[in-house]
Amino acid sequence: MTKIRIGNGYDIHRLVSDRALILGGVQIAHELGLLGHSDADVLTHAIMDAMLGALSLGDIGHYFPPSDRQWAGADSLMLLTQVNQLILEQGWQIGNIDSVVVAERPKLKPHIHKMRDKLATVLELQPNQIGIKATTNEKLGPVGREEGICAYAVVLLVACE
């Protein structure tokens, strides 16, 4: 019997001026960016939380606390590499990732393939192991009012053979 574990993750960050908008490691042209201690890449953060959650290892705040200055402005793809290494050291590997980014603007569809390819490279996966969808919040709530962007992710981990 194959050993599998499933984790889910969620992240949300406020949109502000004078910050870059980075999603899935891709900088996207927009007049607003996400505010956070690191680069505030909500997609990558949700994926990391899902990976950690699948193995009951806590969340990214445990490993990269916002109170620690060394993580200020950190590239989330570098943090993802560290989380992936932890997962591998525990004897697990990613089977697949499914995710959703929720944003009113900008339109994310033109950037999905680049985000998927960048995440696949960092995680040493095939692009078809990573699903990224984009949707709006139909103008409802803080995301709908364009106060922030959020992301959800589900990760399937498979025991290494």
Image: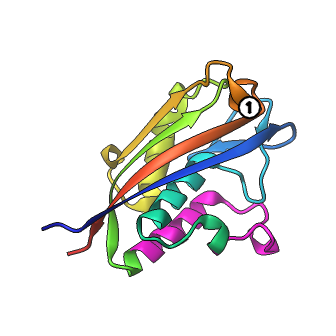
User: Which residue is most to the right?
Assistant: 18
Query: Where residue 53 sits: x, y (%)?
Result: 48, 64
Q: Main secondary structure of the magenta part?
A: helix
User: Which residue is most to the left?
Assistant: 1
Vertical placement of 41 versus 149: above or below? below
- Report if residue 88 is visible in the image: yes
Q: Quadrant of residue 132?
A: top left
Q: On the image, numbered disc 1 is attached to which residue?
A: 142
Q: What residue sits 78% from the left and 59% below the top?
A: 37
Q: Secondary structure at mark 1?
A: helix
Say whether residue 66 is magenta.
yes
Q: Which residues are magenta?
A: 63-87
Q: Quadrant of residue 28?
A: top right
Q: What residue sits 51% from the left and 42% below the top?
A: 115
Query: Where residue 54 sits: x, y (%)?
Result: 41, 64
In the rendered structure, the answer to whether residue 7 lies left or right of residue 48 reads: left
In the rendered structure, the answer to whether residue 136 lies left or right of residue 95 reads: right
Q: Give amino acid for label 1.
A: Pro
- Residue count near mark 1 (Cα–Cα under 10 Å), binned few <14, some 14–19, many ≥20: some
Query: Where residue 119 sits: x, y (%)?
Result: 47, 52
- Report if residue 25 is visible in the image: no
Vertical placement of 26 versus 60: above or below? above
Q: How is the image coloured?
A: rainbow
Vertical placement of 42 versus 52: above or below? above
User: Which residue is most to the bottom?
Assistant: 89
In the rendered structure, the answer to whether residue 149 lies left or right of residue 122 reads: right
Say whether residue 84 is magenta.
yes
Query: Where residue 153 sits: x, y (%)?
Result: 48, 47
Total numbered badges shown on the rendered structure: 1
